[in-house]
Amino acid sequence: MYVWPCAVVLAQYLWSHRRSLPGKAVLEIGAGVSLPGIMAAKCGAEVILSDSSELPYCLEVCRKSCEMNNLPQVRVIGLTWGHVSQDLLALPPQDIILASDVFFEPEDFEDILTTVYFLMQKNPKVQLWSTYQVRSADWSLEALLYKWDMKCVHIPLESFDADKEDIAESTLPGRHTVEMLVISFAKDSL
């Protein structure tokens, strides 16, 4: 369990949008140590953290992060990408889905988008705020988004003071190339 460069960038994006977060329903998928979800909760959002139901240790790390940050109201649930579960079915509509560096293994992309698509069906106006580290030029998320009737907007890091090698007194993101995307239904623009 580690705070990855993408988590710091996404937390900075949340901080720059902190005035719009109070009362928003926010779900972090693949939360791990949960920095973005913790930031959203500290800014007043109603947060649910999730990680794989097949990795109980990850869920325990999410719970520990809530405990260490005095956030007993934050729920932690197991969601495995691409699997329909009781926890997924029971989720209320979300306003924002957070995803920090979940687009890591290309073989997981379809399962992630299946889960996001299901959540978008509950609230077609939901947005996926996602950061990912550019690791390869061999894959494109945009083609998959088109397949799932989604669109993305690339958010310039300098627009929210995340274009430096260090953010908020952290040495992350360092020299890593991190991208920030806001993903929504393509028909949302109609």
Image (spheres, rainbow, N blue to C red):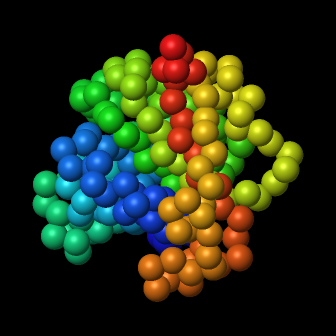
Total marks placed: 0
Residue 23 versus residue 80: which sits nearer the camera?
23
Quarter of the image holding residue 69?
bottom left
Q: Is residue 160 visible?
A: yes
Q: Is residue 69 left or right of residue 160?
A: left
The residue positioned 27% from the left and 49% from the top of the image is 21
The residue positioned 60% from the left and 61% from the top of the image is 157
Residue 35 versus residue 170: which sits nearer the camera?
170
Q: Is residue 124 left or right of residue 140?
A: left
The image position of residue 155, as x and y in percent, is 59, 50
Residue 159 versus residue 8: which sits nearer the camera?
159
Q: Is residue 24 left or right of residue 186?
A: left
63 versus 146 height, above or below? below
The image position of residue 72, as x and y in percent, is 13, 60
Q: Residue furthest right?
A: 138
Q: Is residue 112 visible?
A: no
Q: Is residue 121 left or right of residue 149?
A: left
69 versus 51 height, above or below? below
